Amino acid sequence: MKTDQILYGGDYNPEQWPEDIWPEDMRLMKEAGVNILTLNVFSWAALQPAEEVYDFRRLDRVLALAKENGMQVCMATSTAAHPAWMAKKYPEILRTDFGGIRRKFGGRHNSCPNSAVYRTMAARLAGKLAEHYKEETCITAWHISNEYGGACYCENCEAAFRVWLREKYHTLDALNAAWDTAVWSHTFYDWDEIVLPDTRSEYIDENRTQFPVITLDYRRFMSDSMLACFCLEKEAIRAQIPDARVTTNFMGFYENLDYQKWAQAMDFVSWDNYPSNEASYAEIGMSHDLMRSLKQGQSFALMEQTPSVTNWLPYNALKRPGMMRLLSWQAVAHGSDTVMFFQMRRSTGGCEMLHGALIDHVGTDQTRVFREAARLGRELAAFGGCTLGARTPARAAILFSWENWWAIDACAGPSQDLSYLPEVQNYYTALREMNIDTDLISPGDDLSKYRLILAPYWFMVKEEWAEAARAFVSGGGILVITCFSGIVDENDLAVTGGYPGKLKNLAGIWVEESDALPEGTENSFLYQGNRYPARILCDLLHLSGAAQMDLGGFERDFYRGCPVITRNLYGSGACWYIATTSSRQFYHDFLQDLCGQAGIRPVLTASEGVEVTCRENEGGRYYFILNYTDRAQTVYCPWETEDLLKHTVCPAGIMEIKAKDVMILRQETGKQEPAAI
Amino acid sequence: MKTDQILYGGDYNPEQWPEDIWPEDMRLMKEAGVNILTLNVFSWAALQPAEEVYDFRRLDRVLALAKENGMQVCMATSTAAHPAWMAKKYPEILRTDFGGIRRKFGGRHNSCPNSAVYRTMAARLAGKLAEHYKEETCITAWHISNEYGGACYCENCEAAFRVWLREKYHTLDALNAAWDTAVWSHTFYDWDEIVLPDTRSEYIDENRTQFPVITLDYRRFMSDSMLACFCLEKEAIRAQIPDARVTTNFMGFYENLDYQKWAQAMDFVSWDNYPSNEASYAEIGMSHDLMRSLKQGQSFALMEQTPSVTNWLPYNALKRPGMMRLLSWQAVAHGSDTVMFFQMRRSTGGCEMLHGALIDHVGTDQTRVFREAARLGRELAAFGGCTLGARTPARAAILFSWENWWAIDACAGPSQDLSYLPEVQNYYTALREMNIDTDLISPGDDLSKYRLILAPYWFMVKEEWAEAARAFVSGGGILVITCFSGIVDENDLAVTGGYPGKLKNLAGIWVEESDALPEGTENSFLYQGNRYPARILCDLLHLSGAAQMDLGGFERDFYRGCPVITRNLYGSGACWYIATTSSRQFYHDFLQDLCGQAGIRPVLTASEGVEVTCRENEGGRYYFILNYTDRAQTVYCPWETEDLLKHTVCPAGIMEIKAKDVMILRQETGKQEPAAI
Amino acid sequence: MKTDQILYGGDYNPEQWPEDIWPEDMRLMKEAGVNILTLNVFSWAALQPAEEVYDFRRLDRVLALAKENGMQVCMATSTAAHPAWMAKKYPEILRTDFGGIRRKFGGRHNSCPNSAVYRTMAARLAGKLAEHYKEETCITAWHISNEYGGACYCENCEAAFRVWLREKYHTLDALNAAWDTAVWSHTFYDWDEIVLPDTRSEYIDENRTQFPVITLDYRRFMSDSMLACFCLEKEAIRAQIPDARVTTNFMGFYENLDYQKWAQAMDFVSWDNYPSNEASYAEIGMSHDLMRSLKQGQSFALMEQTPSVTNWLPYNALKRPGMMRLLSWQAVAHGSDTVMFFQMRRSTGGCEMLHGALIDHVGTDQTRVFREAARLGRELAAFGGCTLGARTPARAAILFSWENWWAIDACAGPSQDLSYLPEVQNYYTALREMNIDTDLISPGDDLSKYRLILAPYWFMVKEEWAEAARAFVSGGGILVITCFSGIVDENDLAVTGGYPGKLKNLAGIWVEESDALPEGTENSFLYQGNRYPARILCDLLHLSGAAQMDLGGFERDFYRGCPVITRNLYGSGACWYIATTSSRQFYHDFLQDLCGQAGIRPVLTASEGVEVTCRENEGGRYYFILNYTDRAQTVYCPWETEDLLKHTVCPAGIMEIKAKDVMILRQETGKQEPAAI
């Protein structure tokens, strides 16, 4: 975006208020240092009161006021919630739920993504907005719809699914083979025999399908369907404003949409960060790093966060003093060029009435929340724009794939405790707590810039992914794969010839069986002199080239002695295999060793509870040091740096950082500038 | 009702039995002292075997037999379960459930309250019954339908909802403003765009709506819809019998129906008391007191209770020896003029086959349950009618409002542990265990007769309610309000200008933020030298006139020191604010202080586990002393009284009451007699 | 079946694989000793690609290959999963679920059993298969459909239910009386007014009906409906092959189908044994014994078990080394003449991809699972056919009835902890752990051959059952009945005159009340000097002829002293009554006494954890000794026997059996041979 500082602001919904309050809103927002407003997120019913009537007059007035007050604008298209009149006139735009019930008007994110009426109406509105506002230079970005999500199981989607399948498989023979429909008499002789996978067809209950591969393709299809809606709106905007910068707000690890595919269609990634009360900084950081990695490290926008409370958690605790500032800087530390809130003024109606806002129901600047926000606004303004577009020089990466996620979740067995995200988090947390910057990349991304790649539960492996993995290791990389890997191909068909399938030679092992441990039980193993637990799944593997790296294998049960950790030297690199799931301590100790071997070192060395990340651009390297603890901590920096918040020079050495405080240090370098988002 | 003693009897369903058993039933019921039978509760299919055919012959025979045996009759209208033929012929009478599925015939309470066919048929049957039996002087009351409840989401209800809304709001502009439909693009341009709030529209799951205010109006509408059904039947009866006394049986704290509104349409309140095994006497007492307060203290009818077991609890334990008697007298102690059972003879079919009855499947008087009932029958006969119509001279009240309940339950946030009824119960229990008689009144009731009023979680405050509260305090009353109060108006719109909104000046405080405590955590505070826990919600408030009455505020967290208990002197009275939820001990200690300040004293002083209530009429004051414990206890009475069960004179002083026993003492006074129900 | 050894093999689904793999399959299966294949279980879509087209060519090739390799074949009819084209063309074949939603194509077991199209199509396919393969002597049995189950609530089923009811009751008066429809205005005046019992009619939630008797008849009807489907296919086969041996695979204690009625229509019983990880040998044994008892002790077929893992348990642990062999012999020990697996080769697609198989995804014989299976194959071949058709000489029996199960589950009250199967298991386990062979028979079976019969929770008692019980006891038998017995008749109507109803005179007691114990509470009693807990339900009973056999009755509560265990001498026998539910220890101690009195002795005396069963035929008595523990144990045999696995002679005396090992000893006798299955 066009800016010379970190953009600061957020969602502003003045349509909920009498207009005579707007000037006071402006006064308060400027007092808080706000310089960007997201407008028009949920106004479709007002913008288009009837099919052939568009009325942008109120939005014109809001925009004029924003301009007068020097605000940039992130202009939303309002298409995330269709008007009631449209639902009444065109019931086809309503979704059908997983149980087969057609919805009525209500809620939001309520439109069927394969409704021709919805697609036409949404693109038309986006086009009209773009046409109307194309000269408005204050519009710094376009925000299509809002938090795309959900799914639809209506007849239009069913018909569209068949078209999608025909485009993918061309012939029914190919589909029958890919889906292995000989199982349970599922052979299809006509495309129209194929039905959507829901509780009327393949699902026994909400989470258990009787035919996983159909779910896998349905998820791909539904993600693509919504992406098509996004692209139609984007094209309508581009037709009017060829250089418009277009985004939609993501939700971190949101399973329904393949953001890795979506990001390719977006000019920049933006996302909404709503951690639970209990989320650790490593959990939040992993989401940021995923968002950053979606566009190969390009900086992103923090589009929404709450300044104080949410209203939809089981227990909506207040963000403690200082936490809003800390989490805002954390976003920047991980790659954001914005700090934005939902929302500017607290609603008096609707179900988010108790959700926090810059301006509370009391309507003044005399609240803790406002004061903290205004203080941050001043700090951001003083900080300026030096980090804009800066990139994170990560040498470690974790492979993460939506398709793998979907395949794992659709799979029946082996253990209800086996879950993809927690295991990815286990590995990430170990690296994060060592202050090793890590990307979360697709297996299809360029692997060559990393020295260490971790691929937990890599259940689905495509041939080209396996090829890339082999090339990475051959070229000297260190790859870690784990149990529950290499089991299926991209059609969710099990590989023959022994697990981990396409990774078998690379790993130099054969996994004969996998034992799912009943609830509350565990095995154990020794590694580097320490004993660690083995949980959830234990592979019974045979070495076929790899060396056993643990001491003596599993310690109990009939597979006592079976190797737990193996290493296969392959080309110039090595492929490790971890035959089970273990404890936080194990991941820490193991990855510390591996990082040492890979020559990867912490950004800086800091006390526990202190996060350090790095971004870099032509202006130098920026070290973000964030102390999440309630007491002062230390960090060691071996170079002289400049403290960008205090505007002081810091000699090399140990520094103190106060409780819940942030330090940003710049080290001079001489690199090329990456483009800002 | 017309009676010279407490009415004793209950539901009698002879249609389930061969007629040759009826005389034996009469013999056994008379042996048990029964003098009233509720007849005809579920006989619609028999009374009207086809649309144009009515057949009351069997009911004639039952009634004749009842008369012969000197029984009074509570005549039900049988409209709580429509016949199967009607469902087949007129499917519109069937309800549609919350998920959008139209029901078929089955169960009971199965009719759509907005079905024109149902309304016509039900009123016609009630009218025919009244016409047929209008000369029967044994009919002492009319019992319309049975335990009204549930809800319907069919198209007829949707159309009726729109009519109801139009009557309420007149214009869509007014509705759009009241509902704040600018949120999430909900603006309605045509009444027909409005749909019912269920899982097809606004609900994410059974308990989470995305648009609370619609639910609030829907609940009002659905309660009104059933009330309209009641009124139609009542009018049909009145057209035949102008002085008929009409009721329907309530269910205590039943959320779906606004009994405060319903009670205005009823001649007297009656209700069905089915406590769980674990219910304390204070829990049961609170329901009785609510029922009594619905008609401003008029005595009510205990319409149903089980003589021994229920069949629908998770664990259907037997009522222990003596408990049936004790709970029967407790009803009288709290304002009932009847003691009635479901039912006289145990069914052999249906799902209540294992529900207790006066006459068990064995069919004799040789059971413990029968013997206890017969003993109570004799006791009631001997006791006579002196307490009929007597009133409870309560000086303390708790504000309770169905609309407030609905608004709280529809609200998203702040904590899933925040629940209206338990908090009302906390305050009530403290008063009850001090033996302070308490009314449970609507905020719209006359407040002037009370000295102390408690208003826990008074989330929704209407302007006239706030006005009444101010007048009450101005006039010298003590009002206690708590956290989560004054947040919305009657349209569920948040108040601006600071919480607790319309009560802010009265309370002399401003609540800036509210912290929801995560599960398992608590804060604490000191009051009168004792430490108490702070739970669920902690308000961060500022004094603006009030004085802090706790010592030092919250003891932990960043709002350490914030006041917990405040008192604002206002006119001649005081408004207290409790900024959190606390423990049983706190409510006890705090309310003991406040009662002292308000000059409210226990009815009598008694040992723990002994309940004492008072009723009074022209014949004097009646003290009901009920010992729920398993050992003898004591009670102190400072006046000479007459023991109405033992027929002895009791000198002033300490008296003993045996385990599980009841004493009823009369003190002579000279008051005016209230009307019997 | 035609065989001279225990049949060994299982499901083979070559249609899922390229044909060039089939020869390798054959090679591997023969290596493993397989001699029987179940073919064609889920191939309908392939066999009948369009309504008038049948194509058996691939099946011909499979069968030819099987024959060439000397395999016997169990030929399935493929009708358990209809083709997608059929669902599209004839939507009436699709089931409607319990919530009223019509299903679409998908899953399996998906056809409405009352669809005329389904019945016609299924029978036609079965007939075509039989016609096509009638000369194939390798086909040793016909396997109709697969694991019949589920239920349907569509309009066709509703119409068929009315026909079924009319056939049963003839008149609506009779139905109204049997169903006691006077309750809750349920009187029916036209058969078409009757609707199916589901969540649209009588059900409040998944498990709570408001009219139990309708559910009881619906369950009978639905079981009969599927049985009719079975019979239609059977007749179509018999029309071609008059002496075909026909079965379908049962699922042990599967509630939806009355296997006692089904078994009468089957030539032999077969079933699928999938115990949970935690199942004890007594739990598995009880299922085997039920299956054996369905056809009065005729030997049965173990149709399916997994060689290693399942994929659908919460935690799919591997079968430990030796366990597959042990469980295979256990089946034989309890009456099976086969040992069969699901399946021969592991699927690469579908939801059972991770289910174990003889040939794993790796595709070789180099796996633990294959090796264990091949070892068992050799053992079975060496063992030969001496036990084929042998019968279990049980002298103890437990009464088990599907109708009783259904009635208990539909009943509202008295305790949610009261459950039929666990209590049957309690009694069974006590006998099994004493190594007393036990049949699980219907109350309608011949009782005369037993000395001891246990009838836990015999809630529903038909007159003829009561008569048989009286005759059994009169004739010298010992009968044990328990609380929650004799309460309803076959129409689910409560008996009058006192519980346990029709068994009251036989038991010599009257149960006045039953107290359901709240969660976590228990009472206690003394028996033979030991104290035991009383749980779930405590009957308050009076002796009317019986003698109290416990010491002092219940030890607590107001019914302290009430008898817990009574014995009524009746004719030459005795009827015992146990007025509560107790602990494992009590059942053990009590039944040990009773077996002593009945002259029933353990098959052999063995250490704990060692199961011993007996089968016998003209060739002698066979003692199966199975050691489930992880260490060597002992067994005492008082006769000289022959060890049939080691081919040695064993002198009388104590023998050792190794951990997880099996011994089969033959004792010479001179009995008549029963027919093989």
Image: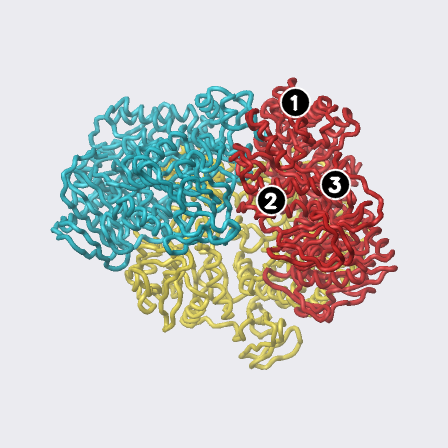
Chain colours: A yellow, B red, C cyan
- Please, what is the three-letter code of the amino acid marked with disc 1? Asp
Residue occupying the point 69% across, 45% down: B331
Q: Which is nearer the eye, A470 or C48?
A: C48
Q: What number is the disc on residue C434?
A: none
- Left or right: B380, with A365 as reference point: left
- Please, what is the three-letter code of the amino acid marked with disc 2? Glu
Give the labeled residue for mark 2.
B206
Give the labeled residue for mark 1.
B60
Figure disc tally: 3
- Pointer 2 chain: B
Q: Secondary structure at mark 3?
A: loop
- Pointer 3 chain: B
- Please, what is the three-letter code of the amino acid marked with disc 3? Gly
Give the labeled residue for mark 3.
B385
Examine the image and state in which quarter residue B270 appears: top right
> Are labels 1 and 2 assigned to the same chain?
yes
Give the distance between the C-alpha atoms of the residues marked 3 and 2, in whole angstroms: 47 Å
- x, y percent for residue C571: 33, 36
Q: Residues within 10 Å of mark 1 (few under 14, many from 20)?
A: few
- x, y percent for residue C280: 34, 51
